[in-house]
Amino acid sequence: MQHENVIELVNVTKSFTLASGTFQALKKVTLRIKPGQLVAVTGKSGSGKSTLLNVITGIDKPSEGSVSINGIRIDKLSESALASWRGRNIGVVFQFFQLLPTLTILENVMLPMDFCDSYPKKERKQRALQLLNQVDIAEQADKFPSALSGGQQQRAAIARALANDPPIIVADEPTGNLDSQTASAIFQLFATLVQSGKTVIVVTHEKEFSAWFENTIAISDGVITNSSTVTA
């Protein structure tokens, strides 16, 4: 069932205890994101971007407030239930790709399906090949990550993030290590995913790609300073 807001944070505060005292990485953040949008998260280093992503993906639990994804209060889930939920509902794309070097590209893409047992075993290879074809690197399926360019590795990482057909893709500076032409192709790929109904959230510093985004969430010192996705 599709909810009006695929992501809803209400009065979320996230505190960490440091040697110097308590640090609030997020401060009473309220945020609503509708499905099928390409959303940018921007802000300086240390502003709270990564913590915001970690709260949305359930990696971090809020110290206060609620986090609902498609109507499910993920801040109330047990660790085991959360891990199972995340495997099926969130696809994560990392800046440094995080492909396993001892597995082929095809095996890397199949891995999330193996973890979640989301597709019958006999269907997983074909699905992985379809995803690699979707990101235009099917011919690289039997190669190891080290044989691929940075742009090809990032495409493979996106295919892996799509393996379990999650409704939400989260990308943390996915083009930070790519040249501008390759980066543009990656954003085109994200836009295509949004057209197919996915919600894609991208942490980015690259202002030249701002036209791709329906919404931009600007965060500073743990507070959202500007966002057309925030409602009163």
Image (cartoon, rainbow, N blue to C red):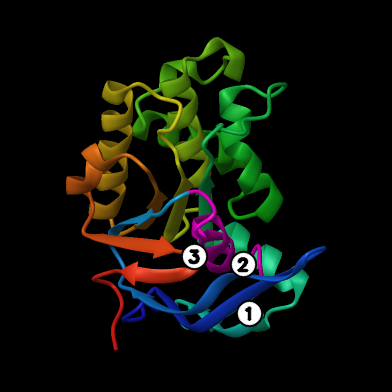
Q: Quadrant of residue 176?
A: top left
- What secondary structure is found at the residue carrying circle 2? loop
> Circle 1 sits on which residue?
75
Image point (67%, 73%), residue name: 15
Q: Quadrant of residue 23?
A: bottom right
Q: Is residue 85 left or right of residue 9?
A: right
Image point (60%, 38%), residue name: 110
Vertical placement of residue 97 versus 92, above or below: above
- What secondary structure is found at the residue carrying circle 3? loop
> Circle 2 sits on which residue?
58
The amino acid at mark 1 is Asp
> Circle 3 sits on which residue?
221
**Span colored in magenta:** 45-61
Q: Is residue 48 magenta?
A: yes
Q: Quadrant of residue 60?
A: bottom right
- Circle 3 packing at 10 Å, graded few (<14), some (14-19), many (20+), is some
